[in-house]
Amino acid sequence: MSAISQPSARELFAPLNPPQRYLFGPGPTMVDPRVYQALSKPIVGHLDPYFIDMMQDVQELLKTAFGFKSGSTLVISGTGSAGMEASVANFVEPGAKFAVFANGYFSDRLTEMARRNGANVVRFEKAWGETFSDAEASDFIRREKPAVVGYVHAETSTGALQEGQAICAAAHDAGALVIADCVTSLGGLPVEFDRTAIDIAYSCTQKGLSCPPGLSPMALSPRAMDWLRARTTSPRSWYLDLKLIHDYSTVSHRYHHTAPISMFYALREALLVIAEEGIENRWERHRRFHRFFVREIEAMGLHMHVPASHRIPTLNTVLVPSGVDDGKVRKRLLEGPGIEIAGGFGPLAGKVFRIGVMGPLATEENLKFFLAEFKKALKAEGYSI
Ligand SMILES: Cc1ncc(COP(=O)(O)O)c(C=O)c1O
């Protein structure tokens, strides 16, 4: 009996050949070739002295990006949401009052995580795109007297930047810790962890740091570390227990989990690329091309969603002109020149384009290319400029 020949896996599955995209969305963003090279280096063990030293380099390099001198930096093996979950699991104890500044999708996620963790969540809600004034922030905290406060520094769903100084000052007066979501800000604009007096900040690798997704850098103030050491109950999450992760990463280096070695290589290289440019120069470059972008967008007769004083320089929310289907514009850009931008969601669905201009894309040449293609796609969808 002759065996029926089965197609081989090679015949069934095409070779991996991802399309070349221009990632002008909110993230992931473009990755420097040096970071791709770092990803392909041979791996070592997660307890190898080489890896331990390298992890410490990463922790050191992160301090500049966070604007941070004392306290601890850590890297969670997981995306930005893992940093969010770690912050909530470790610092928002079941039954504790958690006050959230809610003005977008990611403050809702923070709320949901805290609720699942058994916290008593109180929210100060605003429309997506609005921010909280200093007086509003301190009144809310004075009134609620929470144990922990949470806010999103750069709200990716809306393009709004929330300053944290008044929040942190009022929280500390009330004896509360502050968790800041810096997922979209780190590496792209100043986080100013120390100056703002944040206690716990988490971020990601795939936005302002121009690295693939996969890790969540965190910064913890001395106050947060003291609080953590004094906590007598265990957080519900074992994997995200920051005492254990801190011990593995910076104290005993005893096994906690098998760290994703290649992603740490990538993050180290991405941080070196940033350090070589100079973080302040990078922030200034982002600000300069943000201004350029806004000027050109307004010259096209388009409008920004967020007032100028509260815009995230690396993530622009541009209002979709009436009569234009944003999904069709985005499809044209992706299928034509291979440009990815994002649309709005939740209350902003169909109302905004979310356009990231960060890292290697923040140059005049790249922006001119983008703007010309964006103009073409809008015209093709009926917008007259
Ligand atoms: C502000 C903010 N917080 C949290 C997250 C979650 O990060 P991740 O998708 O890496 O899990 C994101 C992702 O875009 C974000 O923009």
Image: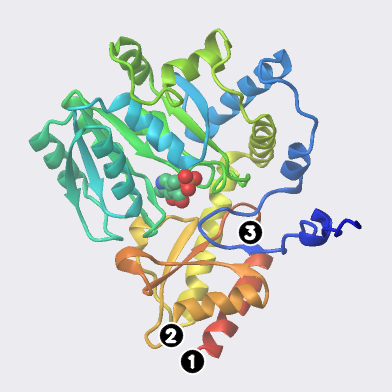
Packing grade of label 2 (10 A; few <14, some 14-19, many >=20) is some
Relative side of 32 to 189, left or right: right
**Residue for badge 1:** 382
Q: Would you identify the image quadrant in which residue 166 lies?
A: top left
Mark linked to residue 324: 2
* Mark-to-mark CA distance, 1 and 2: 7 Å
Q: Marks 2 and 3: in contact by CB < 8 Å?
A: no
Rendering coords of residue 250 (x, y %): 54, 14
Q: Which residue is mark 3?
A: 361
Q: Amino acid at mark 1?
A: Gly
Left or right: where does residue 24 sit relative to residue 307? Answer: right
Query: How far apart are the two marked residues, 1 and 3, measured between alpha carbons?
Result: 27 Å
- Location of the N terminus by quadrant is bottom right
Look at the numbered disc 1 and give the secondary structure of its residue. Answer: loop
- Find residue 341 and report its horizontal and vertical position in percent: 54, 67
Residue in the image at 47% along x and 69% along y: 294
- In the picture provided, is 310 more to the left or to the right than 186? left
Q: Is residue 125 above or below residue 204?
A: below
Q: Quadrant of residue 56?
A: top right
Given residues 179 and 7, the one toward you in this image is 7
The Cα–Cα distance between marks 3 and 2, rounded to whole angstroms, is: 26 Å
Q: Position of residue 109 (x, y in %)?
A: 33, 47
Q: Secondary structure at mark 2?
A: loop
Residue at the far front in the pictured view: 1
